[in-house]
Image (tube, rainbow, N blue to C red):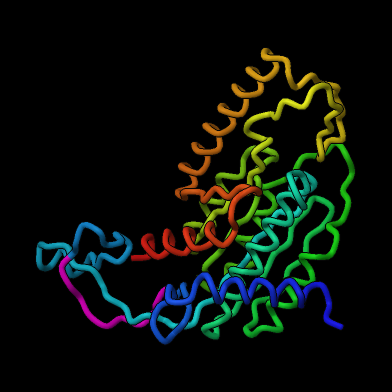
Amino acid sequence: MTSAPDRLLRRLEWRLGRRLDGRLQGNYRTVWHGAGIDFTDLRLYAAEDDVRHIDWNVTARLDEPYVRQYTEDRELTAWLVIDRSASMRFGQGAGKESTATELAVSIARLVSRGGNRVGAILYDNAGHQVIPPRGGRDQVLRITRELLRPAPKGKPGKTTDLEAMLRLAATTTSRRRSLVFVMSDFIGDPGWDRPLARLTHRHEVVVIRVVDPAEVELPDVGVILVEDAETGEQLLVDTSDPLLRGRLAEQAGARETELAEGMRRAGVSAQRITTDQDLLAALIDLVQRSGRGRR
């Protein structure tokens, strides 16, 4: 009898095989490659080049900007930094946590297909777990198993310390340049933009913000009791009240603006994925966006 982690991984492997077949890069059969570390040549700078690759000594000597070219490192290390706080358990179906789990397992399997290593940092205020990067299907199965375990229950009244989560990620991944996926709803204390900027300075970072539609637009379901998943605060609200709906819409808009500004300061562009979205379609879009960004 197969375990729940094995069943989930098999199901996602089957879906990935069908939906991503023909979209992977040649015979290497993976969607993300290493950053490259071996210098091979110099050429004139082009508008789309990364300015970090400019060779300033040669540029000064020849009075024209030149960039260094590198051979591609086929092996990379990827990290999954996953927010497992109470707010991630909100949402339709199994909630944002379930969406993040399936997406993380799918990404881990894609990354590992080319012999790459993948690790994970599972974070909650009540505790965190670091799974060191390794290759192979067994590693993906281990990450799947840990993601399916119930997250530790923290004390009510405390919002997610996203700054601490990202500081932990920066410290844990500091030994080698990596591809880092940060998955969170970004509901928590402010101040996370600085450690995220530190992470993007060292690594290639893909931020995935998991959102439930009810967080953006309150459904009209009459009078209900709502509870803050992180603080435990409860409130009786009339969801059909137009004034309430208008205030919540304004707050949601202000929050979107604040998040976008934080991402801009950190130097990243967040990929937004909702709980009612076709997950495999979202993953294909993520692959294509990442590919364009790396080129």
Q: The N terminus appears in which quarter of the rendering?
A: bottom right
Residue 246, by quadrant, is top right
Give percent across and percent down for residue 13.
63, 76
Q: Which residues are magenta?
A: 34-44
Q: Where is residue 76 shown, x and y percent of the image?
A: 51, 77
Point 55% across, 34% down: residue: 256
- Report the quarter where the C terminus lies: bottom left
The answer to which quarter of the image holds residue 211 is: top right
- x 64%, y 64%: residue: 104
Vertical position of residue 247 compared to residue 30: above or below: above
Q: In front here: 149 or 130? A: 149
The stretch drawn in magenta includes residue 88: no
Residue 82: x, y in percent?
68, 58
Looking at the image, residue 110 lies above or below residue 284: below
Residue at left 10%, top 62%? 63
Is 33 located above or below residue 174 in the figure? Answer: below
Asked whether the viewer can see residue 65, the reply is: yes
Residue 24 is left or right of residue 255, and the answer is left
Specify whether 8 is left or right of 178: right
